[in-house]
Image: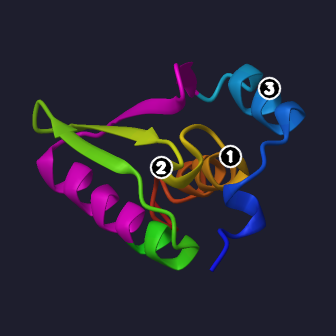
Amino acid sequence: MPAPENETRLDEAALASLLSSGGGWTRIGDSLTKTYTFKGFKGAVAFVNRVADAASAANHHPDIHLEAYKTVRIVLTTHIAHGLTDADVELAGTLDAVERPTGA
């Protein structure tokens, strides 16, 4: 079964827009990375759970690193494509949207 289209192509303009948006995403080789900082451990873990939900819904799973008890570093890449694809750019935007719970 072939990979979904968003895991095989990369809209360079969308990637450039994400990287220049000031949102904190950086490109390191064939991946996108961003570190989110929370007030404490519970906030960081709650975010990890929101990331897990969003990633499962998108069927695209990032590397999630909980560091120094209150920071979460996300690394996005599409393994099947051996690099960045639209799936990574789309999930980056989704993760920024779920960074803080509604009403927080």
Q: How many numbered marks have been drawn onto this rendered protein structure? A: 3
Looking at the rendered image, the disc whose residue lies closer to the viewer, 1 or 2, is 2
Q: Which residues are magenta?
A: 24-52
Looking at the rendered image, the disc whose residue lies closer to the viewer, 3 or 1, is 1
Q: Residue furthest front?
A: 1
**How is the structure coloured here?**
rainbow
Work out how far the residue at label 3 is from the one at label 2, CA to CA, in angstroms: 21 Å
Q: Which residue is mark 2?
A: 79
In screen coordinates, is 99 left or right of 20? left
Looking at the rendered image, the disc whose residue lies closer to the viewer, 3 or 2, is 2
* Image quadrant in which you'd find residue 53: bottom left
Marks 3 and 2 in Cβ contact (< 8 Å): no
In screen coordinates, is 96 left or right of 100? right
Residue 55 % position (x, y)? 47, 67
Query: Tag 1: residue type?
Result: Thr
Residue 41 counted in the magenta span: yes
Residue 2 counted in the magenta span: no
Q: Which residue is mark 3?
A: 16
In what quadrant of the picture does the N terminus appear?
bottom right
User: Earlier along the polypeptide chain: callout 1 or callout 2?
Assistant: 2
User: Earlier along the polypeptide chain: callout 3 or callout 2?
Assistant: 3
Q: Which residue is mark 1?
A: 85
Q: Residue at x 65, y 50 (%)?
A: 93
In what quadrant of the picture does the C terminus appear?
bottom left
Marks 3 and 1 in Cβ contact (< 8 Å): no
